[in-house]
Image (cartoon, rainbow, N blue to C red):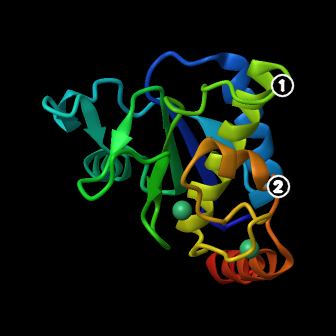
Amino acid sequence: MNTQPAHTIILSPIEALDRVLVDRIRGELTKVFGFPVKIMPLLDDLTFALDRQRRQYHSTLILEVLDREAPPDALKILGVTGQDLFIPILTHVYGEAHLGGRASIISLNRLKEHTGSGSPEKEYHERAVKEAIHELGHTFNLRHCKDPACIMHYCHSVADVDRKSDHLCRYCRTLLKDEIERLTGR
Ligand SMILES: [Zn+2]
Ligand SMILES: [Zn+2]
């Protein structure tokens, strides 16, 4: 009998989101991190995190609730929202995560801006997948990477997001592998 705890990543849509996109994110996360990814809405009302003056939601507060609401045996959690997120020192964030912790979140709000010449939907979905891997990567203890093509590279703009690839550089891949081995005893 397998006595290992259930190493499941929870993908938590915060409102009703594009199902095609949610499924795509789920598939890519499974590939990159190698754990089963379960879609499980954990909260739907973000009013507690709303800053009425900024008309944005404070991502740090949402992370705390995601962490609290997730099943205790969930390995990691990624919340996905269409709302615009911020932390007090920045005008906005594409996402936030507890470094080496459990919870992460991404905002799709600013990823829709159409800048390329291709399909707007393809462009938007690719950005969302990259940001999802990036934020979840932080929960696996990955920090920002200097390599501009690495998915752990910090992005100021959607142009930066478009420029980076959808995978980890060799260095980050090794760090991730070590972290997964540490977490699972594999
Ligand atoms: Zn980051
Ligand atoms: Zn890297």
> Along the line of sight, which residue is nearer the eye, 80 or 185?
80
Q: Quadrant of residue 28?
A: top right
Q: Name which residue type carries label 2.
A: Ser
- Name the residue located 62 percent from the left edge and 76 percent from the top edge: 183
Q: Is residue 6 visible?
A: no
Task: Say whether residue 186 is left or right of residue 48.
Answer: right
Q: Is mark 1 within 8 Å of ligand 1?
A: no
Q: From the viewer's perspective, is residue 154 above or below residue 156? A: below
Q: Counting other residues with Cα less than 10 Å from the Cα at mark 2, is it few (<14), some (14-19), or many (20 or more)? A: some
Q: Can you give x and y, in whole percent of width and height, for residue 117 in the image? A: 84, 25
Q: Is residue 56 visible?
A: yes
**Helix, strand or loop at disc 1?**
loop
N-terminal label among 2 and 1? 1
- Name the residue located 37 percent from the left edge and 53 percent from the top edge: 67
Task: Say whether residue 16 is left or right of residue 186.
Answer: left
Instruction: State the quadrant of the C terminus.
Output: bottom right
Q: Quadrant of residue 180?
A: bottom right
Q: From the viewer's perspective, is residue 59 above or below residue 151? A: above
Q: Can you give x and y, in whole percent of width and height, for residue 4 in the image? A: 66, 67
Instruction: State the quadrant of the N terminus.
Output: bottom right
Q: Name which residue type carries label 1.
A: Ser
Q: Nearer the viewer, mark 2 or mark 1?
A: 1
Q: State the separation of the CA atoms marked 2 and 1.
A: 18 Å
Q: From the viewer's perspective, is residue 146 above or below residue 119? A: below
- Name the residue located 27 percent from the left edge and 29 percent from the top edge: 46
Identify the residue position indicated by label 2 in the image.
Answer: 165
Numbered circle sitting on residue 117: 1
Q: Counting other residues with Cα less than 10 Å from the Cα at mark 1, is it few (<14), some (14-19), or many (20 or more)? A: few
